[in-house]
């Protein structure tokens, strides 16, 4: 089995500890990078790491 490289918005919400709507707001604002694959919206796990790193830098 291969390692997953991306997650759907609901899974990203669970990883970030926020609701799914917040993930969509973050994607629309450009703060959380995502890609469109057909009708699905996918968030690369690297984008979640980038978002969390940027948030830490902002808070410091």
Image (spheres, rainbow, N blue to C red):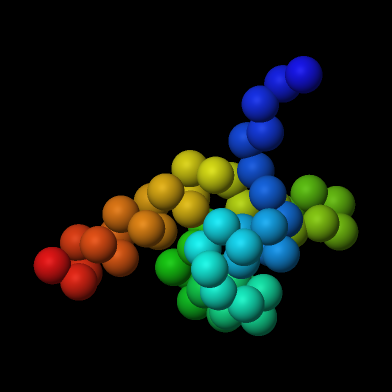
In front: 52, or 35? Answer: 52
Of all residues shown, which one is farthest toward the right? 39
Q: Quadrant of the N terminus?
A: top right
Residue most extreme to the left: 60
Left or right of residue 58: residue 49: right
Q: Residue at x 40, y 58 (%)?
A: 51
Q: Is residue 35 visible?
A: no
Query: Residue 9: x percent and y percent?
Result: 69, 63
Extreme residue toward the top, this view: 1
At horizontal 54% and vertical 44% (from top left) the residue drawn is 45
Q: Is residue 12 above or below residue 27?
A: above
Residue 36 seen from this side: yes
Q: Is residue 17 left or right of residue 51?
A: right
x 13%, y 67%: residue: 60
Q: Is residue 12 left or right of residue 10?
A: left
Query: Residue 53, located in which quarter of the rendered image?
Result: bottom left
Q: Does residue 57 lie above or below 38 as drawn? A: below
Judge by depth and name the residue closer to the eye, 24 or 19: 19
Q: Position of residue 36 (x, y in %)?
A: 73, 54
Residue visible at 81% across and 57% down in the picture: 40
Where does residue 38 sit, x and y in percent of width and height?
A: 85, 52
Number of numbered discs visible in the structure rendering: 0
Give coordinates of residue 42: x percent, y percent.
69, 52
């Amino acid at each position: 089995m291969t390692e997953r490289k991306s997650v759907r918005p609901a899974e990203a919400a669970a990883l970030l500890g926020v609701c799914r709507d917040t993930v969509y707001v973050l994607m629309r604002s450009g703060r959380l990078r995502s890609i469109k694959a057909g009708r699905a919206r996918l968030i690369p796990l690297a984008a979640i790491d980038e978002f969390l790193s940027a948030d830490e830098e902002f808070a410091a």
